[in-house]
Image (cartoon, coloured by chain):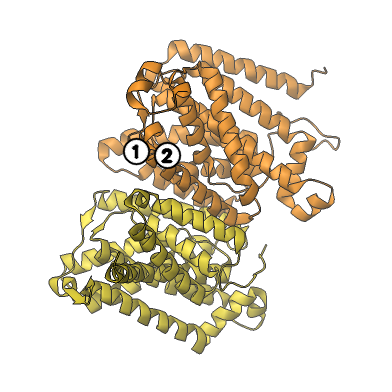
């Protein structure tokens, strides 16, 4: 096992981790603000992937425009989900929201199966994104670099939004104490809606990346990234955006290293490994790495 | 024993069930019978999840995991010795054993309950949706383990060619046992302590209820019946694969409990029948018009609408007045 091999695995892990982190941010933002585990979040990844496929391969629109369109599409879906389902049940017990989001997830998956068929579709980017780059012992495709860099930029942009703008301040205040924030004259509905929009936009773009990375998409693809990003969010501490990013990278790296460094017999157990980690973290470190202890809202 | 009105009604329902089972076995064709069998298994699943989820408020998504454990244990125990030698690599004591259905079912259920205790002791410290996610993790871990333990479970292929042991009488008997046990729990001090935990943990603890033990017991009792249901299921479809015990199944059972009314036995019963019938109605539609998934979409839609407009479900957490024992104030729980 040479140093080059390990470096290669680390690069793979970073690419995977970037995608987990982007999805996990949405989980964390939504949880932080309304204490809801939004299970339909993973399916927005699926929608993002199909929107990309439609615009890019069928219509031949250039890449940057597609990326913007996918961000917008993700945001719109997020807004629709919030308005349609979560706003009417706001104030209900937490588990109600969780069940409802499971319902939306199943609905989106089956709408996908109904309109797009369950047949996996090939997803290929044009050659300039597929070119193989070789640095030392590490090889990767242009798309991998694009994934890492654009994920980084989006995260930086989000951090700027959350920490330096009025909307971000409103979001942080709402996360801290929703009633007090309302008393301070913050428009709670708009704040929640924008959290959904931002989180879902990031999930949508993660769908574009997921398709580019794995080359095949189907309507049920959102399940795995959804679950794993949730695990990532829990590792970092749900509710904390830096935590979600860190958790995403930790999960991506450790999953790739688990498969890459252990004998191949174990690689079939990677999902079990992820969930054993989740349960252990929930038990040992229930607030995650960066999470503060947040009181449950009734 | 005083024959109160509701006791008479219970006896009448029990006898009506026997009459129904007997006449159904004679009059109806295979297809309808299989639907009734599945409905019965779903009733067992919904009512047993209702003990965990409805009475005690432990939101568990791990039900199909327990079902898988029960199903596989039962299937391996009843698997004919001759076939065992051919397909499986199990220890000699297991390879030379072929059990009748009932003890195999009971062992399957017991294994599921035992797993529930082992899993529950660490995991039940979690609350609310963290518990939901941890139990979902448990379900996926069970699936991965079954898929990869090929010498005993034959991996993704699953065990097929099981004997078709399950018939209507087995299902009916277990439905009755499940309803009876669940009813006895609900209207006993033990059940009241479960309900108290669901409503307010701190207050329940102040009243001297052992939170932890009651929670573990609620999970284990639910898991026992899930294991039984798994065994019945395996011998009804005569095959068992890890893919059957998916998160979608967990979701469907949860939908039944929520739609029926979390905590209501009658509600779970009715919702289980309703959903088995709805899925069967939509199956020909899906196959003829090639629109797969419409059943699931409808199910999800019903769920979301119920959550928005009637969050306590059809029956709330009560039983209909005619069925439940009157309490001193004259109200019904």
Query: Residue A165's spot in the image, x, y percent?
Result: 49, 88
Compared across the picture, whether B3 is left or right of B83 comes to: right
Pointer 1 or 2: first along the chain: 2
**In which quadrant of the rendered view does residue A210 lie?**
bottom left
Q: From this viewpoint, is residue B316 visible?
A: no
**In which quadrant of the rendered view does residue A208 lie?**
bottom left
User: Is residue A14 depicted above or below B201 in this figure?
Assistant: below
Q: Quadrant of the C terminus of chain B?
A: top right
Taking the view exactly as shown, the residue that stands out farthest to the top is: B26
**In which quadrant of the rendered view does residue A81 lie?**
bottom left
Please state the chain letter of the residue tagged with numbered disc 2 in the rendered image: B
Residue on which the image places disc 1: B156
User: Is residue A113 depicted above or below A28 in this figure?
Assistant: above
Q: From this viewpoint, is residue B237 visible?
A: yes
Please state the chain letter of the residue tagged with numbered disc 1 in the rendered image: B
Compared across the picture, whether A219 is left or right of B278 comes to: left
Neighbours of disc 2 within 10 Å: few (<14), some (14-19), many (20+): many
User: Is residue A226 depicted above or below A192 in this figure?
Assistant: above
Which residue is at 46% across, 33% downward? Answer: B276
Query: Residue A33's spot in the image, x, y percent?
Result: 56, 71
Query: Residue B161's spot in the image, x, y percent?
Result: 35, 22
Q: What shade does chain A have? A: yellow
> CA gap, disc 1 to disc 2?
8 Å
Q: Any idea which chain is the orange one in this picture?
A: B
Residue on which the image places disc 2: B146
Q: Quadrant of the N terminus of chain B?
A: top right
């Amino acid at each position: 096992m040479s140093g080059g091999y390990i470096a290669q695995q680390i690069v793979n892990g970073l690419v995977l981790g970037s995608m987990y982190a982007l999805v996990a941010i949405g989980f964390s933002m939504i949880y932080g603000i309304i204490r809801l585990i939004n299970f339909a979040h993973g399916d927005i990844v699926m929608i993002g992937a199909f929107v990309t496929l439609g615009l890019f391969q069928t219509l031949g629109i250039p890449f940057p425009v597609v990326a913007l369109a996918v961000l917008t599409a993700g945001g719109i879906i997020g807004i629709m989900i919030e308005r349609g389902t979560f706003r009417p049940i706001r104030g209900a017990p937490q588990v109600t929201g969780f069940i409802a989001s499971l319902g939306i997830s199943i609905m989106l998956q089956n709408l996908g199966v109904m309109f797009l068929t369950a047949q996996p579709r090939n997803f290929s980017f044009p050659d300039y994104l597929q070119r193989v780059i070789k640095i030392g012992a590490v090889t990767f495709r242009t798309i991998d670099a694009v994934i890492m860099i654009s994920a980084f930029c989006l995260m930086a942009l989000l951090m700027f939004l959350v920490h330096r703008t009025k909307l971000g301040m409103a979001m942080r205040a709402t996360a801290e104490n929703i009633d007090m924030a309302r008393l301070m004259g913050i428009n709670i509905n708009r704040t929640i809606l924008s959290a959904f929009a931002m989180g879902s936009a990031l999930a949508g773009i993660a769908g574009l990346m997921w398709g580019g990375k794995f080359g095949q998409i189907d309507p049920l693809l959102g399940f795995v990234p959804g679950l794993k990003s949730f695990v990532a969010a829990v590792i970092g501490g749900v509710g904390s955006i830096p935590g979600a990013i860190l958790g995403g990278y930790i999960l991506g790296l450790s999953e790739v290293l688990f498969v890459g460094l252990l004998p191949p017999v174990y690689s079939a157990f990677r999902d079990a490994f992820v969930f054993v980690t989740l349960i252990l973290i929930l038990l040992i470190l229930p607030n995650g790495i960066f999470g503060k202890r947040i009181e449950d809202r009734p | 024993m005083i024959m109160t009105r509701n006791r008479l009604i219970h006896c009448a329902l029990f006898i009506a069930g026997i009459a129904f089972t007997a006449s159904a076995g004679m009059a109806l064709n295979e297809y309808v019978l299989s639907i009734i069998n599945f409905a019965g298994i779903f009733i067992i699943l919904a009512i047993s999840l209702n003990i965990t989820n409805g009475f005690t408020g432990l939101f568990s998504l791990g039900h199909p995991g327990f079902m898988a454990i029960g199903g596989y244990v039962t299937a391996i125990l009843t698997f004919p010795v001759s076939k065992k030698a051919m397909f499986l690599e199990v220890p000699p004591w297991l390879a030379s054993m072929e059990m009748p259905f009932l003890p195999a079912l009971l062992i399957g259920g017991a294994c599921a309950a035992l797993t529930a205790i082992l899993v529950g002791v660490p995991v039940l410290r979690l609350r609310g949706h963290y518990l939901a996610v941890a139990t979902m993790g448990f379900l996926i871990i069970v699936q991965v383990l079954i898929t990869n333990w090929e010498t005993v479970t034959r991996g993704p292929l699953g065990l097929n060619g099981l004997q078709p042991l399950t018939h209507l009488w087995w299902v009916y008997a277990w439905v009755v046992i499940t309803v009876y046990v669940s009813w006895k729990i609900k209207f006993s001090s033990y059940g009241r302590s479960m309900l108290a935990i669901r409503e307010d943990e701190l207050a329940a603890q102040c009243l001297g209820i052992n939170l932890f033990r009651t929670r573990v017991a609620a999970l284990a009792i639910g898991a026992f019946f899930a294991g039984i249901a798994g065994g019945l299921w395996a011998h009804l479809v005569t095959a068992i694969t890890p893919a059957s015990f998916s998160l979608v199944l967990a979701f469907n059972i949860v939908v039944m409990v929520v739609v029926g009314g979390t905590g209501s036995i009658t509600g779970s019963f009715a919702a289980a029948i309703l959903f088995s019938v709805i899925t069967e109605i939509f199956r020909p539609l899906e196959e003829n018009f090639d629109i797969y998934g419409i059943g699931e979409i409808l199910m999800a839609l019903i769920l979301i609408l119920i959550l928005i407009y009637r969050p306590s479900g059809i029956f709330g957490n009560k039983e209909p007045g005619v069925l439940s024992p009157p309490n001193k104030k004259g109200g019904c729980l």
